[in-house]
Structures are given as C-alpha cells and as structure tokens.
C-alpha cells in the first residue's frame, strides 16, 4: 500500500473510531447508559497518545509495547479515557477481516481514585460495539478475560465463545 493510500485509510478508520467513542459519550450524557454521579461532559474518550502511554507506565503493564504492536493494524480499536487530566482507562483490540468481530485484546483501568472503577469495561464494550456496528461486524469479543472479571463480563451480555490456540474468547452479538 503506498503512503498516500495508507494515510487515507488511517484517517478513515480513526474517524470511525472517533464516531464510536462519540456515540458512547452521547449515550452516557443522555443517561442511556446508567453510571451514577459521573459528569461525562468533562471526560475525553480519545486515541491512545504518547501522553497516555507515559501515564500508563505507572500501571505496571506493558502498554507501550502493546500499542506499538497494534498500531500497524489500520482497523484497530483503541481508546484512552481521561477526566480532568487523569488517565482512567485504556483499551486496544483488532477487527477480523471479514464480517465477524471486533475483539478487545487488552483493557485496563486506573486502580486507585477512579470514579469509573466499576464501569470502564461497560464503557469500552459499548465503544467496541459502536465500532463493530460502523464496520458491519456481527460480534464483540473479549480475548483472555481475567478469571475474576468473567462474571462482570457475563453481566454485560458476554458468554464463552471459544478457546482457540490457547486463548479464551467471550463474545456477545452486536445489537442493531
């Protein structure tokens, strides 16, 4: 792919990721997704920048390496959740080539002093579903969710989909 075509494709997919994040913000501010006591007008849902990676370095998880590995995928899914200059959550994933899915590969939240502590997974799952709708995908998947979080994901509508090449996947259908 020549550089001009690659740039155009990157812009196309970033605009779709932005639209997916904006749709979730809209649903949150209208109260269609219920999270009590949080002002979403003061939150930013954006791409994962170098500033976010610098903040996340304190989380003891290799975010810089992970983001470096996913950046070449033009159809990737990514979000950094910010409020008042504090990074509250990060997520990255990829899309299948066909109509199947958007998969969330990594998701983490700030552990201490996080007003979204119980809700980052809900927000990220909604964004991934919005992205899946825009790309006409059928499912949202989670790759290797932590055992302690499986009940949480099941409460969000995910169920065990498959174990493939040693990885465990949970999924839910994209709602029209």
Image (cartoon, rainbow, N blue to C red):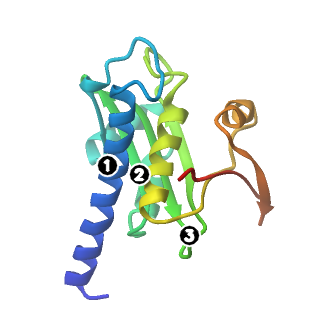
Up the image or down, 80 lies above or below 171; here it is above
Q: Please name the residue that numbered disc 1 is placed on.
A: 47
Taking the image as drawn, is residue 61 in sight? no
Give the numbered dot on residue 96.
Answer: 3
**69 or 169, nearer to the observer:** 169
Q: Nearer the viewer, mark 2 or mark 3?
A: 3
At x 53% / y 34%, what residue is drawn?
A: 122
Q: Is residue 173 left or right of residue 95?
A: right
Q: Earlier in the sequence, mark 2 or mark 3?
A: 2
Give the numbered dot on residue 78.
Answer: 2
In the rendered image, which quarter contains the N terminus? bottom left
x, y percent for residue 71: 39, 63
Q: Is residue 50 left or right of residue 110?
A: left
**120 or 148, nearer to the observer:** 120
Q: Give SS at disc 3.
A: loop
Up the image or down, 19 lies above or below 31; here it is below
Q: Give SS at disc 1.
A: loop
Q: Quadrant of residue 154?
A: top right
Q: Are marks 2 and 1 in contact (CB under 8 Å)?
A: yes
Q: Give SS at disc 2.
A: strand
Give the numbered dot on residue 11.
Answer: none
Q: Earlier in the sequence, mark 2 or mark 1?
A: 1
Q: Quadrant of residue 36?
A: top left
At x 73% / y 36%, what residue is drawn?
A: 150
Most extreme residue toward the top, as rendered? 37
Mark 3 is surrounded, within 10 Å at the Cα level, by few (under 14), some (14 to 19) or many (20 or more) other residues, namely few
Mark 1 is surrounded, within 10 Å at the Cα level, by few (under 14), some (14 to 19) or many (20 or more) other residues, namely some
Distance between the alpha carbons at the discs numbered 2 and 3? 15 Å
């Amino acid at each position: 792919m020549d550089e001009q075509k690659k740039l155009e494709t990157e812009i196309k997919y970033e605009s779709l990721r932005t639209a997916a994040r904006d749709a979730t913000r809209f649903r949150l501010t209208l109260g269609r997704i219920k999270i009590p006591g949080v002002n979403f007008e003061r939150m930013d849902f954006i791409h994962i920048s170098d500033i976010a990676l610098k903040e996340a370095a304190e989380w003891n998880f290799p975010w810089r390496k992970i983001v470096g590995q996913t950046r070449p995928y033009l159809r990737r899914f990514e979000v950094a959740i910010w409020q008042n200059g504090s990074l509250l959550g990060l997520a990255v994933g990829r899309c299948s080539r066909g109509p199947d899915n958007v998969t969330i590969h990594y998701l983490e939240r700030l552990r201490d002093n996080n007003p979204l502590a119980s809700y980052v997974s809900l927000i990220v799952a909604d964004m991934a579903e919005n992205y899946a709708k825009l790309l006409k995908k059928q499912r949202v998947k989670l790759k290797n969710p932590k055992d302690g979080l499986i009940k949480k994901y099941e409460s969000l509508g995910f169920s065990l989909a498959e174990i493939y090449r040693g990885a465990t996947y949970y999924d839910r259908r994209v709602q029209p």
